[in-house]
Amino acid sequence: MIKIGIEVSRRKLLCDLLDNPGRYFFILSEGGRAALCIQTCDFQGDDINTHIINGFSLDKNDELSSIFDDGIHDSILNGCKWERRTPDGREYPISSHLENTLCRLPDLMYWIISKVLTGGRNLVIYSSKINA
């Protein structure tokens, strides 16, 4: 296995996260629950960690609900099943609905860059989605 890393400025990474969220985000479904996730690794491409990403807003009943719920549901129902790193879990590519939602959240992407990518952590990039 060959591991390569690409160094990029925060500004370029922010732009790429907004322009191509499908490269970084995926849906992880385990135990009847599903969540929007990203993965990070160390500088050698090892020590892969999965991070759940979520955002909440008040719904019409003044209750907190995830802004990603519809997109997660669409991803699992309409997406193809595909395996990534966890053999016991099910992972799905994000739907176009969820991609559009993520493209409109520059503050979330900035938070990922400034808070999640600390201590030598790097984003894991998946260059293509598998379509069935």
Image: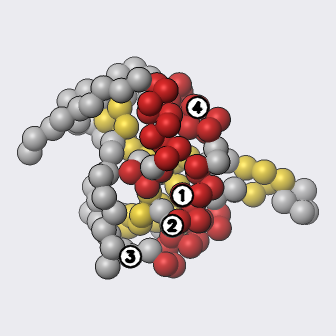
Left or right, 55 with reference to 89:
right
Real-space Cα distance between discs 4 and 1?
17 Å
Q: How many labels does the image show?
A: 4
Quick one: which residue is furthest to the left in this view?
Answer: 1
Which residue is tagged 1? 99
Quadrant location, the N terminus: top left
Real-space Cα distance between discs 2 and 3?
10 Å
Residue depth check, mark 4 versus mark 1: number of the one nearer the observer: 1
Residue kind at label 3, given as amino acid type:
Cys
Determine whether label 1 and label 2 are within 8 Å by CB: yes
Residue depth check, mark 4 versus mark 2: number of the one nearer the observer: 2
Tell me if mark 3 has few (under 14), some (14-19) or many (20+) residues whose alpha carbon lies within 10 angstroms of its own. some
Real-space Cα distance between discs 3 and 1?
16 Å
Residue kind at label 2, given as amino acid type:
Ser
Which numbered disc, 2 or 3, marks the residue that appears first in the sequence?
3
Which residue is tagged 3? 80
Which numbered disc, 4 or 1, marks the residue that appears first in the sequence?
1
Query: At x 91% / y 63%, what residue is drawn?
Result: 61
Determine whether label 3 and label 4 are within 8 Å by CB: no
Give the x, y percent position of residue 74: 56, 73
Looking at the picture, does residue 13 appear above or below residue 9?
Answer: below
Q: What element carries label 3?
A: loop
Left or right, 48 with reference to 59:
left
Which numbered disc, 4 or 2, marks the residue that appears first in the sequence?
2
Q: What element carries label 1?
A: helix
Which residue is tagged 2? 95
